[in-house]
Image (spheres, rainbow, N blue to C red):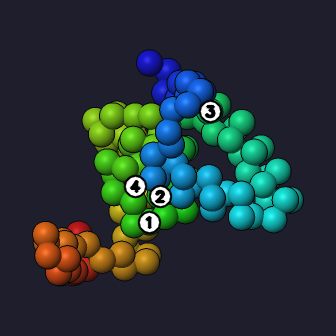
């Protein structure tokens, strides 16, 4: 595997997932100029290396879990952990932004704390 995502169009009539619908609605709500810029990013996205895609996603949304980042980049969790630049970026992000870590129980209660290295 060369780290590139294999994007294929869904079969006609295939329903979109809730996540895909939300993304599409958000994307189409952008001003036309930003939509054009976004389409340019999509072309570069498929050409970018896995670590670069992962860092870009984490920069856009620091709350994304590593598992979600890996899935969105077309990588396995194990492949993502092999990128030293991604691991270093995540450590730096946690240190600079004080991103809290936490848990959410089945009842919706949340507990958060700041990680220390």
Q: In the figure, is residue 35 to the left or right of 56?
A: right
Label 3 Cα crowd, 10 Å radius (few <14 / some 14-19 / many 20+): some
Task: Look at the numbered discs 2 and 4 and tell me whether their residues touch, using CB distance below 8 Å.
Answer: no
Q: Looking at the image, is mark 1 or mark 4 nearer the viewer?
A: 1
Distance (Cα) linking label 3 and label 2 = 17 Å
Question: Which residue in the protein does label 3 denote?
Answer: 46
Q: Residue furthest top?
A: 1
Determine the residue positioned at 37% across, 70% down: 94
Who comes first in sequence, dot 4 or dot 3? 3
Who comes first in sequence, dot 1 or dot 3? 3
Label 1 Cα crowd, 10 Å radius (few <14 / some 14-19 / many 20+): some
* Secondary structure beneath label 1: loop
Residue 10 spot, x, y in % from top left:
55, 28
Question: Which residue in the protein does label 2 denote?
Answer: 58
Q: In the figure, is residue 24 to the left or right of 62?
A: right
Who comes first in sequence, dot 3 or dot 2? 3
Of the numbered discs in the image, which one, if any, rests on residue 62?
1
Q: Quadrant of residue 95?
A: bottom left
Distance (Cα) linking label 1 and label 3 = 21 Å
Question: Which residue in the protein does label 4 denote?
Answer: 88
Q: Quadrant of the C terminus?
A: bottom left
Q: Quadrant of the N terminus?
A: top left
Distance (Cα) linking label 4 and label 3 = 23 Å
Task: Look at the numbered discs 1 and 2 and tell me whether their residues touch, using CB distance below 8 Å.
Answer: yes
Residue 38 spot, x, y in % from top left:
73, 51
Residue 7 appears in the rendering: no
Label 4 Cα crowd, 10 Å radius (few <14 / some 14-19 / many 20+): few
Distance (Cα) linking label 1 and label 4 = 14 Å
Label 2 Cα crowd, 10 Å radius (few <14 / some 14-19 / many 20+): many
């Amino acid at each position: 595997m060369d780290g590139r995502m294999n994007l294929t169009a869904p079969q006609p009539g295939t329903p979109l997932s809730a996540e895909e619908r939300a993304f599409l609605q958000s994307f189409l709500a952008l001003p036309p100029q930003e939509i054009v810029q976004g389409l340019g990013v999509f072309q570069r996205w498929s050409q970018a290396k896995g670590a670069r895609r992962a860092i870009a996603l984490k920069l856009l949304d620091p709350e994304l879990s590593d598992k979600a980042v890996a899935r969105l980049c077309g990588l396995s969790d194990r492949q993502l952990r092999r990128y030293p630049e991604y691991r270093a970026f995540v450590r730096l992000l946690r240190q600079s932004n004080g991103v809290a870590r936490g848990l959410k129980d089945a009842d919706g209660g949340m507990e958060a704390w700041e990680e220390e290295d």
